[in-house]
Image: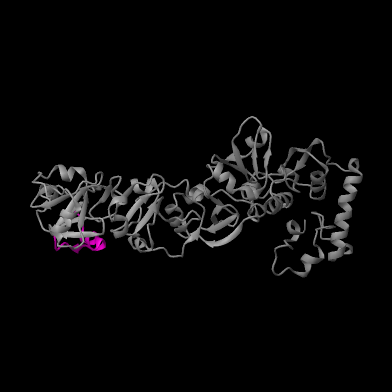
């Protein structure tokens, strides 16, 4: 009442006259305020006493609870009246104290002015009450009917479907689910399905996640997150609905999750970041440090191409399958190569989601154990590292080997094979000597050491297809 009469709750510089007529008591529409009721104490005491009288002697007054009442729109009777069913004594008291209802123009401009027939007292009371404390009709913010499982976030005049159980869980700070009649839902306009954003009555839009709010900078940032400012133009959660959330600062497009992942959000998609150096591949560097959100808060966003620098061994978090990232195209690593060769030690290993790996783009081919550098040089995986080998050592297998970029060559840090190179299949321990495009079976390890002069044996690990492409020469025993 103090707010709707003189804005005393929110005013930063209330006047003396606002205090002396704080509750509008003794201030009829037809004349000036009665001086005998001036003063803050008088105003609050007399007004409170008056509401007690309304409740104690309801039949003494024109407007009564439990029946339809004809209530004027304005002190000017030419503006007409409308039929209002008054549900309870609290509402009856408001209409007795301020005997006018808002017309359509006053309701259409809820925070502004209507027309010459508008009255604002009871409109402002309802507006301020629902802004501060929520709906006057239900004791819950999240509602549904008994017959329909659809849950809605209800504001003063709208309802927003919540069709995702994860989103519903993140709204749990708004309290328990309430059950309402279909007529209540029908009286509220249906807004867009609620995603991960809400808007307060001041017009600020926030991403919410399990009790935390991150303020959206502008509509461009909201678009990066796959949402549209226009969809939230009419949403206005009350102050009471916003109050349980903790304001955690500005929304960043860089997100870290408790699950150990990092995403860069832009273009309406989430792009998993392989490691800190890979963030340099972002089209625009994030303006703010990473914020912490649960994986679930990003659930509605599709996966975009991940940010993965060249020269990483990328493992699928779910399946364990691996690919090598390269500027020339991601290379698929067949089963066995990581375990048998030195691949997992030669390259940094990172884990990404299955959908991120699928979005990495065109493949550069299948890892066979043999690579071709940008200058045509040949490199091979071994049990101890990567070595550069003499051109033609693996014959036709080199021609069909995947081409890799200079960046990946550098990341593999190859050494030079100064002695003989032995070769085996990733799926078999049988040893061969690679020689001029042929393979020669090595019958014993003593025979291998005799060829190296006692130096360490360099064993290349290749796909069976590489061995199959090499003609077999004479055995070495």
Left or right for 205, reference 271:
right
Left or right for 349, reference 448:
right
* Residue visible at 61% across and 31% down in the picture: 148
Coordinates of residue 399 in the picture (x, y in percent): 12, 49
Q: Quadrant of the N terminus?
A: bottom right
Residue farthest toward the top in the current orientation of the protein: 147
Q: What colouring does the structure picture have?
A: one colour
Coordinates of residue 183 in the picture (x, y in percent): 67, 33
* Residue visible at 23% across and 55% down in the picture: 382
Coordinates of residue 460 in the picture (x, y in percent): 20, 53
* Residue visible at 69% across and 68% down in the picture: 12
The span picked out in magenta is 403-419
Coordinates of residue 34 in the picture (x, y in percent): 86, 61
Task: Answer whether residue 71 is magenta in the image.
Answer: no
Say how many tags the image has.
Answer: 0
Task: Answer whether residue 409 is magenta in the image.
Answer: yes
* Residue visible at 17% across and 58% down in the picture: 449
Left or right for 337, reference 468:
right
Left or right for 425, reference 267:
left
- The answer to which image quadrant residue 144 occupies is top right
Evaluate whether residue 402 shows in this view: no
Q: Nearer the viewer, residue 404 or 395?
A: 395
Evaluate whether residue 126 shows in this view: yes
């Amino acid at each position: 009442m103090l707010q709707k009469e003189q804005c005393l709750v929110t005013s930063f510089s209330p006047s003396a006259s606002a205090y002396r007529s704080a509750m509008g008591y003794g201030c009829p529409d037809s004349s000036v305020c009665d001086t005998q009721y001036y003063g803050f104490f008088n105003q609050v005491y007399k007004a409170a006493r008056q509401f007690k009288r309304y409740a104690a002697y309801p039949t003494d007054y024109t407007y009564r609870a439990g029946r339809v009442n004809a209530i004027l729109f304005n002190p000017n009777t030419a503006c007409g009246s409308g039929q209002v069913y008054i549900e309870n004594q609290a509402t009856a008291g408001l209409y007795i104290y301020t005997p006018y209802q808002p017309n359509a123009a006053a309701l259409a401009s809820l925070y502004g002015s209507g027309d010459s027939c508008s009255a604002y007292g009871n409109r402002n009371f309802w507006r301020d009450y629902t802004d501060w404390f929520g709906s006057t009709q239900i004791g819950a913010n999240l509602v549904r009917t008994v017959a329909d499982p659809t849950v809605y976030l209800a504001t003063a005049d709208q309802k927003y479907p919540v069709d995702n159980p994860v989103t519903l869980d993140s709204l749990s700070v708004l309290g328990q689910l309430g059950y309402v009649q279909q007529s209540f839902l029908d009286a509220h306009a249906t807004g867009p399905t609620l995603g991960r954003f809400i808007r307060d009555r001041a017009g600020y839009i926030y991403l919410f996640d399990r009790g935390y709010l991150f303020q959206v900078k502008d509509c461009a940032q909201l678009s990066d997150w796959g949402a549209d400012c226009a969809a939230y133009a009419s949403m206005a959660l009350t102050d009471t609905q916003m109050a349980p959330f903790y304001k955690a600062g500005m929304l960043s497009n860089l997100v870290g999750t408790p699950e150990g992942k990092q995403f860069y959000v832009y273009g309406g998609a989430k792009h998993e970041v392989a490691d800190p150096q890979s963030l340099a591949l972002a089209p625009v560097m994030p303006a703010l440090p990473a914020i912490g959100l649960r994986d679930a808060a990003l659930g509605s966003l599709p996966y975009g191409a991940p940010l993965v620098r060249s020269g990483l061994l990328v493992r699928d978090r779910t399946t364990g399958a691996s690919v090598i990232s390269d500027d020339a195209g991601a290379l698929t690593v067949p089963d066995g190569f990581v375990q048998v060769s030195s691949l997992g030690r030669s390259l940094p290993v990172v884990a990404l989601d299955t959908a991120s790996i699928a979005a990495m783009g065109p493949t550069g081919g299948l890892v066979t154990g043999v690579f071709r550098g940008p200058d045509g040089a040949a490199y091979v995986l071994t049990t101890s590292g990567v070595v550069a080998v003499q051109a033609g050592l693996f014959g036709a297998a080199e021609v069909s080997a995947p081409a890799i970029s200079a960046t990946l060559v550098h990341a593999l840090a190859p050494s030079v094979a100064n002695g003989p190179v032995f070769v085996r299949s990733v799926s078999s321990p049988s040893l061969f000597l690679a020689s001029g495009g042929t393979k020669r079976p090595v019958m014993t390890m003593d025979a291998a050491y005799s060829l190296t002069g006692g130096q360490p044996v360099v064993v290349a690990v290749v796909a069976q297809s590489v061995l199959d492409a090499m003609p077999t020469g004479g055995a070495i025993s």
